[in-house]
Amino acid sequence: MPRALILGGTGLVGRAVAHRLLAAGWRVDATGRDPARMPPELSALGGGFKAVDRADATALRAAVGEGTDLLVDCLCFTAADARSLLPLAAHATATVLVSSRAVYLDAAGNHVNSSTPPHFSGPISETHPTMTPRDDIDYRSREGYGANKVAAELVVLESGLPISVLRPSQIHGVGASPAREWAVVKRVLDGRTALLLARRGAGGVHTTAAANLAALIETVAERPGTRVLNCADPDAPSVLEICRAIAGYLGHEWEEVLLDDTAPVGLGCTPWDSPHPIVLDTSAATALGYRSAGTYATTIAPVLDWLVEAARGGRPPLDDGYFAEYFDYAAEDAFLSGRARR
């Protein structure tokens, strides 16, 4: 029975990877600081939990033990994190570092966290230019996140160890924080009869189901190597298509009001907005033998069920500060009222 150790295994990505591997017959241990956060469905499948802080090198080495077939790091954000991963990877047959599409730059030097949105001319491949690596700026800042990820990537890629760097985009699934789908789910639960979408609901940012990222991780576990791979859903749905998929699953119908540039700024915005489409080229993963778990529409059911159940149970307050701009119903109603009078 092959063994996997997932650093940060109780979060969005870790739980999806653990679930897939456990179902395939792997022995899986997830690390975390709080045993209470271990998803019960993973324990029911036989998953183990190790109370280990990602910054505790001694405890991490003990968790690896004599070795592991697969090591997955969901908590590597900086070059220092990557350097601490290397001694562990030396005792693993295959290792995965979860990075991000936030590392990519457009021709003008803009990235997804820039004040000026990036404009990519087409699908982004793994050889596309990336941000300058930095470790002198907080990775939690807009300018620091992608730059620190690049620095971490370089550390592991230059090590010569069989470490796969995966670059997903806007990961969705049970346990996501924030769960972007809530911007639509809440509207459905509130009984809204109209959906306003900026830019006519066109464009959008490529999404990645946690289940698809888990499928790719299983693929690279079977084919250890040093590489960089994009990971995204096999389709690249527009904002309108995303909203239709969510409303359709929940059995909700509403009027779609597709706004143009004359609409008030901020009206009809969603978490997937982008003035220019951002699409990842995933052909390298496919060539390796990866097969997706499903499209966006076919992989969102679990997260939608989770959000509805959480909302009805009053836990947690999902309409916090992150989502406030998506629920300005007063502004929407004023716009719709003015449109009706014209």
Image: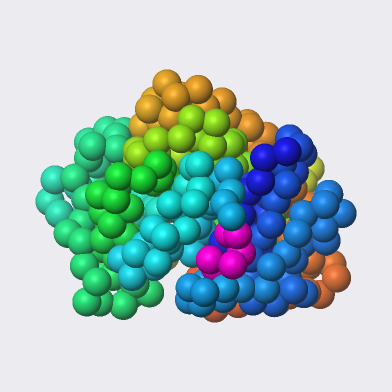
Decide if residue 47 is on the left or right side of residue 225.
right
Percent x, y for residue 55? 48, 76
Q: Nearer the viewer, residue 51 or 246?
A: 51
Query: Where is the N terminus found, in terms of image quarters?
Result: top right
Q: Is residue 240 at all visible to an observer of this figure?
A: no
> Where are the magenta residues, as a range?
60-65
Percent x, y for residue 220? 50, 35
Percent x, y for residue 74? 51, 59
Q: Main secondary structure of the magenta part?
A: helix
Decide if residue 60 is on the left or right side of residue 211.
left
Residue 103, located in which quarter of the rendered image?
Answer: bottom left
Taking the magenta stretch, the answer to whether it contains residue 37 is no
Residue visible at 28% across and 57% down in the picture: 155
Residue visible at 47% across and 58% down in the picture: 88
Decide if residue 19 is on the left or right side of residue 244.
right
Q: Nearer the viewer, residue 175 or 90?
A: 90
Decide if residue 41 is on the left or right side of residue 271.
right
Number of on-image labels: 0
Residue 6, located in which quarter of the rendered image?
Answer: bottom right
Taking the magenta stretch, the answer to whether it contains residue 64 is yes
Residue visible at 21% across and 56% down in the picture: 131
Residue that sits furthest to the front in the current view: 66
Residue 160, located in which quarter of the rendered image?
Answer: top left
Residue that sits furthest to the left in the current view: 108
Q: How is the image coloured?
A: rainbow
62 is higher (above) or lower (below) than 213: below
